[in-house]
Image: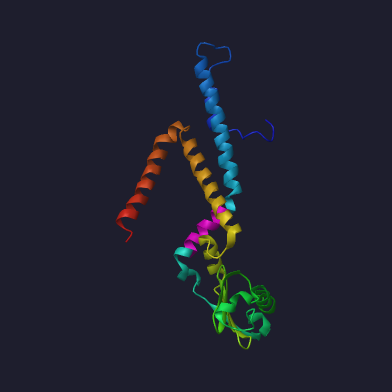
């Protein structure tokens, strides 16, 4: 067996032992069916093992964060730390094309320069989620997993007040679990993790059909688990 071949399994070996001898040509259809079964088992088992190992970190992460998300009080997820700061922006960044500071002149507000200044001066992380321009004030909001920063800028003087709020490690991983304020890349990670979990579950279900001694009890237990989940959702969830 080459290194690239799927691993041998007791299921496939059992099917192979029960296959007719090579010289037995009385039932060629049966022989082809058994060969197909063996190949199906080998491929399914290969997928089940290696997809499980590839997605092991993701499965472990979403399992653990499911507990921290459901019981935040167990892990001090309510802890919060705030940092206050203030500073000064160039007045020209806050003026409209006519030199006025009214809301109609908001197209002339140098949003890029303001955002970059705030990031560099105060090590702000997270993504920009809102830049609101009003007649007398600009409000800039950044958000990331377990983190938020809000800047309030006076358009006349250029003076601003900044509040950064951090909620700790548990809040960060909880937000990663929910995909809240995590950006498009992490959204893809969540989708891929869901695909991996689906493949693991589907291949495990397929394999149980090739285990004669465990097929019936395995399917019964699986159905009982599904029934319990549905019953709890219908009867016990408000």
- Report the residue at 49% width, 41% height from top: 202
Residue 210 in percent (x, y) is at 48, 32
Q: Nearer the viewer, residue 117 or 60?
A: 117
Q: Residue extending furthest left?
A: 235
Q: Residue furthest front?
A: 98
Say which quadrant the N terminus sits in.
top right
For the C terminus, which image quadrant?
bottom left
Instruction: Please check the rendered image and state whether residue 212 is part of the magenta-colored stretch, yes or no.
Output: no
Q: Is residue 64 magenta?
A: yes
Whole-percent x and y of residue 64?
A: 52, 59
Whether residue 43 is situated above or below residue 190 in the rendered picture: above
Identify which residue, 49 or 69, lies in the foreground.
Answer: 69
- The answer to whether residue 7 is left or right of residue 222 is right
**Majority secondary structure in the magenta region:** helix
Question: Based on the displayed image, in which of its 4 quarters is residue 187 positioned?
Answer: bottom right
Q: Is residue 9 visible?
A: no
Which region is colored magenta? 58-68
Identify which residue is drawn at 58% across, 49% down.
Answer: 55
- Find residue 30 and report its horizontal and vertical position in percent: 50, 18
């Amino acid at each position: 067996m080459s290194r690239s071949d799927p691993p041998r399994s007791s299921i496939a070996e059992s099917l192979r032992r029960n296959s007719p001898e090579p010289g037995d040509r009385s039932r060629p259809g049966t022989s082809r069916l058994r060969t197909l079964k063996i190949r199906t088992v080998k491929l399914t088992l290969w997928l089940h093992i290696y997809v499980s190992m590839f997605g092991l970190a993701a499965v472990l992460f979403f399992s653990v964060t499911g507990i921290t998300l459901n019981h935040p009080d167990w892990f001090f997820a309510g802890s919060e730390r705030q940092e206050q700061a203030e500073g000064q922006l160039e007045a020209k960044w806050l003026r409209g094309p006519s030199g006025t500071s009214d809301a109609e002149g908001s197209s002339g507000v140098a949003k890029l320069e303001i955002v970059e200044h705030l990031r560099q001066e105060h090590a702000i992380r997270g993504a920009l989620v809102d830049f609101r321009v009003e007649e007398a004030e600009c409000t800039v909001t950044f958000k990331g997993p377990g983190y938020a920063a809000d800047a309030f800028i006076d358009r006349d003087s250029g003076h601003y007040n900044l509040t950064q709020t951090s909620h700790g490690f548990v809040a960060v991983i909880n937000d990663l679990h929910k995909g809240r304020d995590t950006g498009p890349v992490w959204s893809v990670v969540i989708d891929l993790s869901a695909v991996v979990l689906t493949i693991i579950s589907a291949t495990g279900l397929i394999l149980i059909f090739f285990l004669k001694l465990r097929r019936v009890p395995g399917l019964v237990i699986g159905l009982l688990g599904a029934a319990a989940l549905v019953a709890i959702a219908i009867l016990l969830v408000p």
